[in-house]
Amino acid sequence: MTSDDQAPDALLERLAQLSLFEDCPVEELKNIVRQSGWISLPAGQLLIEQGAHSKTLYILLSGRLSVVLNYGEASERRLSELGPGETVGEMGVITGAPRSASVVALRDSELLRIPDDLILPFLEQNPQILLRLFGRVAQRVSHMTSDRDNSRRPRSIALIPLDTDSDWPAEAQRLAEAGGKQGYAFRLFQPGDSLSGADGLEAAERAHDLVLLLADQTGEAEGSAWRTLCLRQADRIVFLVSAKSGGRQASPLPPHLHRDRRRSDLVVREQPGTKRPTPAKTWHAALSQADWVHRLRPDEEEDYARLARHLLDRARCLVLSGGGARGFAHLGVIRALREAGEPIDLLAGTSMGAMVAAACALEWDEPTITYNFSQAFVKGRPTSDFTLPLVALLSGRRVSKLLKTFFSDRQAEDLWRPFYSVATDLTNGVPALQSRGPLWRNLRASAAIPGLLPPVQDGGRFLGDGGVLANLPVEFLLSPKRGPIMAVDIARDPVLQASEEEVLDLEQPFWRLWPLIRAKKAPSMVSILLRAGTIGSERNGEGRDQIDLLISPPLQEIGLLDWKAFERAREIGYQEAKRVLMERDSPPAP
């Protein structure tokens, strides 16, 4: 709907502050203000429909918009989110082509509508602004051809309590203080506060890193007027639940939130002294909407600091690659990171990297993680249950038993820190993100090297080793980027090396090949399959340019199946991580 009561002077001042209108004559801007329309767009309403013809340019003044391909269809895909100061429709203005995507309001938004009979003459008189629009068109085209969601960091977050079992105002205040201790400015609005006026939401968003809108808990699905306002004004939603009642007192979600396109998270406030995370499936409706599940233990200050970083999209992410026995180096890297006091907020991995990442997300201490992995892989001999190779060389039962032993009945969403593993959807030929469901089963799928271990059936698809397409699964943290990314790549060093002096005959009878394989002068079938399972992802390299700190331990002397190299690989990872951290933290040479 349209509103024309905005003060022209205030609007002129806001336009002059935008980079798009830098160096633009004041009289030109005044003319735009006089002849343009002011639009108030309620949350959930379409601004632009894909395929429509229009040369109107919109400037987002407040709120948040989502750019969506195939809006409302099964193939719908979010391209990006737009924040204040960004333009909408510049491609249609410049090219005259139909709208390439739909644009919908994620929250109540206000825009300036500049019609084509005004913007086109304006651009002719101000070619520098036309060039800036060309730059934005180039960015939008790049975004449309990329799988990444190029969203801006959220400015306001609605905290929605689903029960009354915790003191949510105190918890919200503690969260804001945790952000403040890290140098971030948080502003908390609570029931009874006003979002309008000089000290309201718009001013708070400009003056703070993040605004928290704490809703009241009414027990009703529709909620109060304040709760509705919080939801309409937020860029992102966080559902708050308490483990105290086990979900028995939780109120239902408002019906419209089941169709909401905003990012959302579930925060479980645990009971003091809790040793094991409360199952998140207790709050099924909220869990189905959530991207991540976070835990708040009242006696763990770092939990609040970690959540603050997540909400700011500044979570410290750690991604671990697959690589068989070389994965023991990950244990040394984890030890070095802990000793250095490096925060680890979100963990991810493929194959062996996924197993170590899961152990870290469970917060296993140094003796526990060392003992469990030594028992599982050094003494457990996971690659020794050969079978008639109808589906794979190994039966897989030994690996499954070991994973069940150490990860028991855990669910991937029920760890102390957010975690995901990656498998390969062999049926559809795409990577498969695993952040829900039985943890041991997800890890088993992530490690199922085709031909070596049987794939894992998941509904109507078969899942295999994630290393086939994403051995270092960074790309899942880029839609949008969750924060600084540390990655450990243990698969870069050569694995299958041939001697230049001696040419091997690999077609000779097996009784002649076997001594060569035992002496590691010829590759075994298992090592060939392991290596073949990661070549595709290395050539892809999706997201590597977004890694902020890369650790690549020198592991060329350790084979993929050299389980007895446990201590050696662990020490190599430890020393290399210490070296990289020291190099990062050292002052630059004069």
Image (cartoon, rainbow, N blue to C red):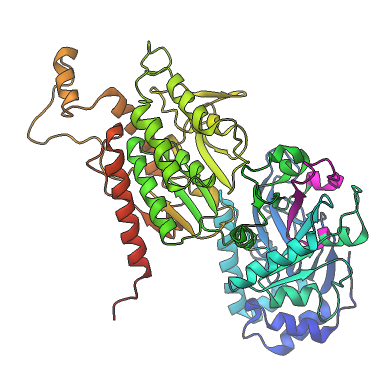
Q: Is 143 positioned to the left or the right of 11 in the image? A: left
Vertical comparison of 193 with 417: above or below = below
Give the residue displayed 30% in from the left and 31% down from the top: 561
Q: Nearer the viewer, residue 253 or 18?
A: 253
Residue 335 placed where, x, y %? Answer: 40, 52
Give the residue displayed 26% in from the left and 49% down from the top: 554
Residue 108 placed where, x, y %? Answer: 82, 63
Q: Would residue 518 be visible to someone looking at this image?
A: yes
Q: Is 455 positioned to the left or the right of 89 in the image? A: left
Residue 396 placed where, x, y %? Answer: 44, 21
Name the quadrant containing residue 277: top right
Give the residue displayed 46% in from the left and 19% down from the top: 397
Q: Would residue 114 be visible to someone looking at this image?
A: no
Q: Is 415 positioned to the left or the right of 234 in the image? A: left
Give the residue displayed 38% in from the left and 26% down from the top: 380
Q: Classify the position of the C terminus by image quarter.
A: bottom left
Vertical comparison of 160 with 209: above or below = above
Residue 35 placed where, x, y %? Answer: 82, 78
Q: Which residues are magenta?
A: 231-259
Q: Nearer the viewer, residue 276 or 129?
A: 276
Q: Classify the position of the N terminus by image quarter.
A: bottom right
Name the quadrant containing residue 480: bottom right
